[in-house]
Amino acid sequence: MKSIFFKRAKELFFALFVSFLGKAQTPIFEISGNGLKTTSYLMGTMHLGCEESKLVPANFRSYLLKTEALVLEMNLKKVSEQIKITTKAIVPKERSLDRLMGARYFEFKKEVQQQYQLDVAALERFHPMMTTSLLAAKLLPCSKPKGSETILMEVADSLKIRVIGLETASEQANILFSMPDSEAVRSLWEMGTNRKKAQQDWDELQTVFAQGNIDSIAKFIEQSDEIKMDLEKMLFQRNRNWMKTLPALMKKKSVFIAVGAGHLGGSHGLVALLREAGYTVVEKQ
């Protein structure tokens, strides 16, 4: 029973940031200069999409082959990380969804069952953001979502290339679950009771991501009223934290860095931060 529960929590966690979905058309960037002896590469990922979609560029394997390690936001291969995710995802009874929603809970439960064919009773003890992400995953036009990180790890395993995480599961969960309960419940209510509007919002976001321009993606995220997140905490601060780790990794060996596409563009994005730090960052064709 416990292993099934852990698996369920892991699936829910991987559905987070489902906004970065669809067909991955973001380019691969080459990183050199600033004292580096070898070249590294940077790519934006879609954390969740349909397996039949082009989740990674067709030529990524040729660049991955040139490196010694695959660097992801988190090393998803570690069982210990999955257990930590489960621990962080579960809320105490006094913060269960039925208590947070109060009298509205039964109406919400009915709407979600009708619109998403999902019984939220089994999800009451998960953080509301987990349930929001699970509903978002159901907006995808496929029954078996798959993230580009999964594809990258499968290829890395076949090539016997090491996987490195920039964050631990605890660090990432602390950020993702930092939204106040009232805000998390409000977002969940809006998505759960109005699937048509939610579908329109996600479809618009998918269109922007499919175009593959990292600055357009960053601008859309920053200006959209539909993406309700603390950008400083969710994106900008994490980018700055990664910039404290990446230079040492790249100096030691050639690495292939793959993080959410929303982290790459704009003045706070990794491409701009790497250039400010003195690296030459060139888009590959």
Image (spheres, rainbow, N blue to C red):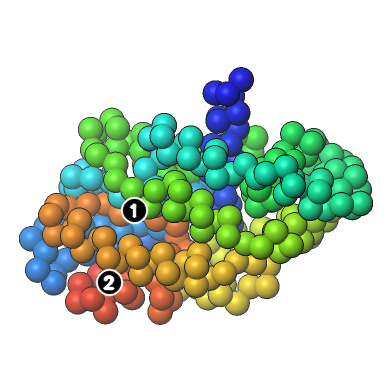
> Is residue 8 positioned above or below 205 on the image?
above
Q: Nearer the viewer, residue 243 or 1?
A: 1
Q: Nearer the viewer, residue 92 or 135?
A: 92
Q: CA distance from mark 2 to mark 1?
A: 16 Å
Q: Nearer the viewer, residue 222 or 140?
A: 222
Please give the residue where the numbered disc 2 appears in the rendered image. 274
Mark identifier at residue 166: 1
Badge 2: residue crowd in 10 Å (few <14, some 14–19, many ≥20):
some
- Say which element carries label 1: strand
Q: Residue at x 13, y 72 (%)?
A: 34
- Say which element carries label 2: helix
> Is residue 60 positioned above or below 162 on the image?
below
Is residue 271 something that shows in the picture?
yes
Q: Earlier in the sequence, mark 2 or mark 1?
A: 1
Q: Position of residue 142 (x, y in %)?
A: 64, 39
Q: Residue at x 23, y 38 (%)?
A: 161
In screen coordinates, is 245 left or right of 11?
Answer: left
Three-letter amino acid code at the position of disc 2? Leu
Q: Position of residue 207 (x, y in %)?
A: 59, 61
Q: Residue at x 44, y 71 (%)?
A: 236
In screen coordinates, is 126 left or right of 112?
Answer: left
> Is residue 252 positioned above or below 65 on the image?
below
Mark identifier at residue 80: none
Three-letter amino acid code at the position of disc 1? Leu
Q: Residue at x 72, y 49 (%)?
A: 95
